[in-house]
Amino acid sequence: MFTLLLIVFIDLVGFGIIIPFLPFFAEHFEASPDTVTLLIAVFALFQFLFAPYWGRLSDRIGRKPVLLMTLAGLCLSYVWLGLAESLPMLFAARAFAGACAGNIAVAQGYVADVTPPERRAEALGRIGAAFGLGFLLGPAIGGLLAGPDPANPNILPPALAAAAMTLTAFTLALARLEESLGPEVRAKAEAAPRRGRAAMWIEVLRQPHLGILLMMLFLVPFTFSGIESTLAMWTEREFGWGARQNGWVYSYLGLVAVITQGGLIGPLTRLLGERRLLLLAPVAVGAGSVAVALTPGLAPPLAALGLVVFGISIANPTINSLISQRAASTDRGMVLGVAQSAASLARVFGPAWAGFCFVAFGRDWPFLSGGLIMVVMGGLALRLFFALAAAGREERPGD
């Protein structure tokens, strides 16, 4: 488990390095704000397309081989990004990276393989904490390497640094990661009939409560990806900031995620239970989103962004834990792959929607619309709360 967390952390440092300068790199090729958000969306689109297949493949051949394949692909994608000389080339590099980044379902499947159902929210929170640590260090490194000038960011150094971090994660996985899925489980998965994307979705949605959970898993990244994809452009227009300053902002948000998912999610789960945490999450995200747009100065919007990340950080591991508990061990990778696919689909439409709002209504509207979306999620959380209460339990182990 520790080795997997270390691999995820190193990989996410590489991913985080790219975040602060990517919007400015796209604007270097004269991309408009809505085109910049489409660059974020194309990454998520290919993640959506490939995540279920990586998950299903890992059920059949094991988690480790799939992690190795995808880490190698991510390393190549960062080199490609650094060498991009046009906007279409930049889009192609991000599409390839998104296809390989569908491996998050494989990492979640690994955690579910080695963790009992009652500990999964906490264990998946640790995966989230590893993500947060990656975002704590990665954007700071990327911002420093890209420089403070939004008009002329340095491109190749941060891209090569991201490739080096991912290569380190690949090497560590190759040398130290043990396979989590036993041969008998892989054999059962191999013998099971092959299913297409539609069949996977239908099978998952037939299981109790998964429809509501997948809808919630869609709304959380829809809202946050819209905020994330427009944040650098918002701070550029609000404060005149470039990649370096935004790198520190993303690092601060990573710190909030680390504290929440690494230290708070376990005690909060034991204190409140997973159902009540899902009631808290949309309140925090919605209130924080609206406060970013409506509060003046610098400190209040930063505090509000921290509240948004706190809500996201309790929502994701809790929803994924409940999903994993409703999946049989032979299908866990597939179910989590479908779930990751739903989240990736949200990251396609979320940035596109935010870019439209940014251009059509003004720079504050990606945040204000996020608050409205969280009202819908709050209603779904209430519905799930009462549905699980009526069933008489919060958890339904899939094994």
Image: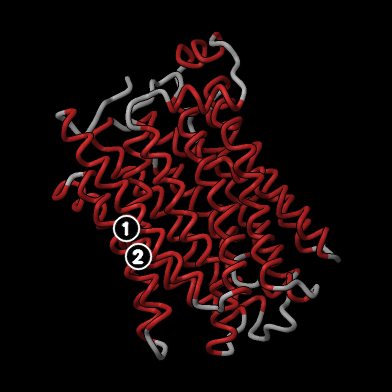
Q: Is residue 267 above or below residue 195?
A: below
Quadrant housing the N terminus = top left
Q: Nearer the viewer, residue 277 or 108?
A: 277
Tag of residue 286: 2
Q: Distance between the residues labelled 2 and 1?
A: 6 Å
Horizontal arrangement in the rendering, residue 377 relative to residue 17 (left or right)? left
**Numbered disc 2: secondary structure:** helix
Question: What residue is rendered at 73% in x and 52% in y?
Answer: 77
Residue 241, above or below 33 = below
Q: Please rate how many residues cluster around mark 1, counting C-alpha atoms within 10 Å: few if below 14, some from 14 to 19, many from 20.
A: many
- x, y percentage for residue 236? 59, 84
The numbered disc on residue 88 is: none
Q: On residue 282, which mark appears? A: 1
- Rendered residue at 36%/56% (across/down): 313
Position of residue 124 relative to residue 228, above or below, is above
- As helix, strand or loop, the secondary structure at mark 1 comes to helix
Q: How many labels does the image show?
A: 2
- Percent from the top left, x then y, of residue 341? 54, 40
The image quadrant of residue 217 is top left
* Residue 263 quadrant: bottom left
- Mark 2 is on which residue type? Gly
Amino acid identity at mark 1: Pro
- The image quadrant where one finds the C terminus is top left
Q: Are the two marked residues, 2 and 1, in contact with CB atoms closer than 8 angstroms?
A: yes
Left or right placement of residue 288 versus residue 54 in this view: left
Furthest residue to the top?
191
Q: Please provide percent x and percent y for residue 87.
A: 81, 64
